């Protein structure tokens, strides 16, 4: 036996079998080639799209037989392939190995492992059936490349349906229902077209079409005529993004899966700006700074206002407003003033606005923002809100003393930091060790150019040993350092919206040129990114393949699952979502329908 194992080919193949096949736990339970195999409560049906490609649609069906029959089938299949393995081993020991024998042995080992795993899963289903009362009450598990037999994680902080309860429908159906409820109240015909347009966005068709709208619509299974209808609903339909955002907030809150964060007694409202670059767009209404270019480039700039919460263990933004630049004053400064003014006017008593260093403290105080948390530049300065004592010589001082939270160098001279008014420390655990964080406070300050009596605020510098430079924040509230640090760290979900809209669904490249379309497409892309992230978070984790041992509920995995698939054909839609058949015989056709007319002088 030792001499046999020393042969290099046997050693290599045995290593591959043990390390790759048995160690990874491959499972081939998903339907392949249109065949329906026993895969729990999910089976795959192949459907042909309008452009000739086939897609697998996951639908819910009862399992083939009872639990004991499924376990018996799994054990019988495992025994059969185990016999094949034993027979091949005897053949190879007596006659000699060949390449085809090694390949068949690999396949048999894989099938044995698959059967054993399937039997374990069937036992888990049987146990769940005893707990819930009957096998018909099982909600099922998501099946892509393998099944997870363990129950979902307990989530003590959340109420509402768990991911396993939501998985009673396929991901495509869950996404389709979310889009249908979102657009149901829009005018008939427009709602159906906008629903299909949003489906094109969330399924990532713009990635393969490189931003072209009509190829992306046809890749999602629509004919040429249907694509034109959908385009008309997007470009000329009677809808506003504010209506969709309000409906989306109501829809998410009604489901009870998303839980809003509350830190220090405040709910967060995060403000940010984002730009969709349009360097070749003629008469682009606005510009936005791009770090790679080192200057401002033509872009469609939008102001984002979001709330922050979580689904399970994943933080998610809930968009409230998307604001465009003012056509009369398309500057970015005007957009900032517009966003801050609107948020300040509608800010609730228990809401706190969190902003990054792209906004100025002067702008917040000018619009009368009552509660905010703003990150400051490291060279920021302020003044005391009282005058220093008169020294008896010269003109009496009119402004307070300068407060410099952090030391810095100016023209080769070191400017010392102002000693803090108070200081506090707390400990956090990081990678098994305790870290001590320190917060230094300077209270009752005004702007460096303001006199005593103006709007006051506080500055806090948080020193974290994991970072070289401290975090400098400004706020009018009196909160402890740990709460302020947690509040500012909770603003990061707003950065997920541009990421999902541009990179995840492919809306970074845009080829629309009408005045309204260039604004509507970025707005819909941001909303589609938020929908994709939310639906992915409330579904069970979707593995990308057998190598994905610890999948997470990310929008990229859901988009990869939906990519290339048409809208679910068997999904029941509300009565309002239907085609609006209109008479068009009286309208000009062909070249006469879009022939350019000379403008009157």
Image: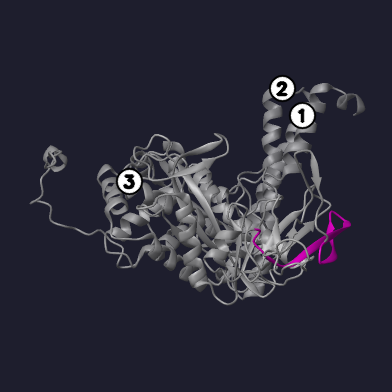
Q: Nearer the viewer, residue 601 or 153?
A: 601
Q: Are marks 2 and 1 in contact (CB under 8 Å)?
A: no
User: Is 582 on the left-hand or right-hand side of 150?
Assistant: left
| Residue 146 can be seen, yes or no | yes
In the picture, the disc for residue 222 is 3
Q: Are marks 3 and 1 in contact (CB under 8 Å)?
A: no
Residue positioned 58% across, 38% down in the render: 291
Q: How many marks?
A: 3
Q: Is residue 399 above or below residue 600?
A: below
User: Is 84 on the left-hand or right-hand side of 31?
Assistant: right
Q: Residues within 10 Å of mark 3 (few under 14, many from 20)?
A: many
| Residue 151 can be seen, yes or no | no
Quadrant into which the C terminus falls: top left
- Looking at the rendered structure, the secondary structure element under dot 3 is loop
Q: Nearer the viewer, residue 138 or 187?
A: 187
Query: Distance between the Cα atoms at labels 2 and 1?
Result: 12 Å
Query: Distance between the Cα atoms at labels 2 and 3?
Result: 51 Å
Residue positioned 41% across, 37% down in the render: 209
Report which residue position mark 2 lands on: 98
Q: Position of residue 194 (x, y in %)?
A: 34, 56
Q: Position of residue 272 (x, y in %)?
A: 54, 55
Magenta stretch: give its range: 420-448
Query: Distance between the Cα atoms at labels 3 and 1?
Result: 48 Å
Taken as a whole, is the magenta stretch helix, strand or loop?
strand
Q: Position of residue 450 (x, y in %)?
A: 62, 63
In the picture, the disc for residue 13 is 1
């Amino acid at each position: 036996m030792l001499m046999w194992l020393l042969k290099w080919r046997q050693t290599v193949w045995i290593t591959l079998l043990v390390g790759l096949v048995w160690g990874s736990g491959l499972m081939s339970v998903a339907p392949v080639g249109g065949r329906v195999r026993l895969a729990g409560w999910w089976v795959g049906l192949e459907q042909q799209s309008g452009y000739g490609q086939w897609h697998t649609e996951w639908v819910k069906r009862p399992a083939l037989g009872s639990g004991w029959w499924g376990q018996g089938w799994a054990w019988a299949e495992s025994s059969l392939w185990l016999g094949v393995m034993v027979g091949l081993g005897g053949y190879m020991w007596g006659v000699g190995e060949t390449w085809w024998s090694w390949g068949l042995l690999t396949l048999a080992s894989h099938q044995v492992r698959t059967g054993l795993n399937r039997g374990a899963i069937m036992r888990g289903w049987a146990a769940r059936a005893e707990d819930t009362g009957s096998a018909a009450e099982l909600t099922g598990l998501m099946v892509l490349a393998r099944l997870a037999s363990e129950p979902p994680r307990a989530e003590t902080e959340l109420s509402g349906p768990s991911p396993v309860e939501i998985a009673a429908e396929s991901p495509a159906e869950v996404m389709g229902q979310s889009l249908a409820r979102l657009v149901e109240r829009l005018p008939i015909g427009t709602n159906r077209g906008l629903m299909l347009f949003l489906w094109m966005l969330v399924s990532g068709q713009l990635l393969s079409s490189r931003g072209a709208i009509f190829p992306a619509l046809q890749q999602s299974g629509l004919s040429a005529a249907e694509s034109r209808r959908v385009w008309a609903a997007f470009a000329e339909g009677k809808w506003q993004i504010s209506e969709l955002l309000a409906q989306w907030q109501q829809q998410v809150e009604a489901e009870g899966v998303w839980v809003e964060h509350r830190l220090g007694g405040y709910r967060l409202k995060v403000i940010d700006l984002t730009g969709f670059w349009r360097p070749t767009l003629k008469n682009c209404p606005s510009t936005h700074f791009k770090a790679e270019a080192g200057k401002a480039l033509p872009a469609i700039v939008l102001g984002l206002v979001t709330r922050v919460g979580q689904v399970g263990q994943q933080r998610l933004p809930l968009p409230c407003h998307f604001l465009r630049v003012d056509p009369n004053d398309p500057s970015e400064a005007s957009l900032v003033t517009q966003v801050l003014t609107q948020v300040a006017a509608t800010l609730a008593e228990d809401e706190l606005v969190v902003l990054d260093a792209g906004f100025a403290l002067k702008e917040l105080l000018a619009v009368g923002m009552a509660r905010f948390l703003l990150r400051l530049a490291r060279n920021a300065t302020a003044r005391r809100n009282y005058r220093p004592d008169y020294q008896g010589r010269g003109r009496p001082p009119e402004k307070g003393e300068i407060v410099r939270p952090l030391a810095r160098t100016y023209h080769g001279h070191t400017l010392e930091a102002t000693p803090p008014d108070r200081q506090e420390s707390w400990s956090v655990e990081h990678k098994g060790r305790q870290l001590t964080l320190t917060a230094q406070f300077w209270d009752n300050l005004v702007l460096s150019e303001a006199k005593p009596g103006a709007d006051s605020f506080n500055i806090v510098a948080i020193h974290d040993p994991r970072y070289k430079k401290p975090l400098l924040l400004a706020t009018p509230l009196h909160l402890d350092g740990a709460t302020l640090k947690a509040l500012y760290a909770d603003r990061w979900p707003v950065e997920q919206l541009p990421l999902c809209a541009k990179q995840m669904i492919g809306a970074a490249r845009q080829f629309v040129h009408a005045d309204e379309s260039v604004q509507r497409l970025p707005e819909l892309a941001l909303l589609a990114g938020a929908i994709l992230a939310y639906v992915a978070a409330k579904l069970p984790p979707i593995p990308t393949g057998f190598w994905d041992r610890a999948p997470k509920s990310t929008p990229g995995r859901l988009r990869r699952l939906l990519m290339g698939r048409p809208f679910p054909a068997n999904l029941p839609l509300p009565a309002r979502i239907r085609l609006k058949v209109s008479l068009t015989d009286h309208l000009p056709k062909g070249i006469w329908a879009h022939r350019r007319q000379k403008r009157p002088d």
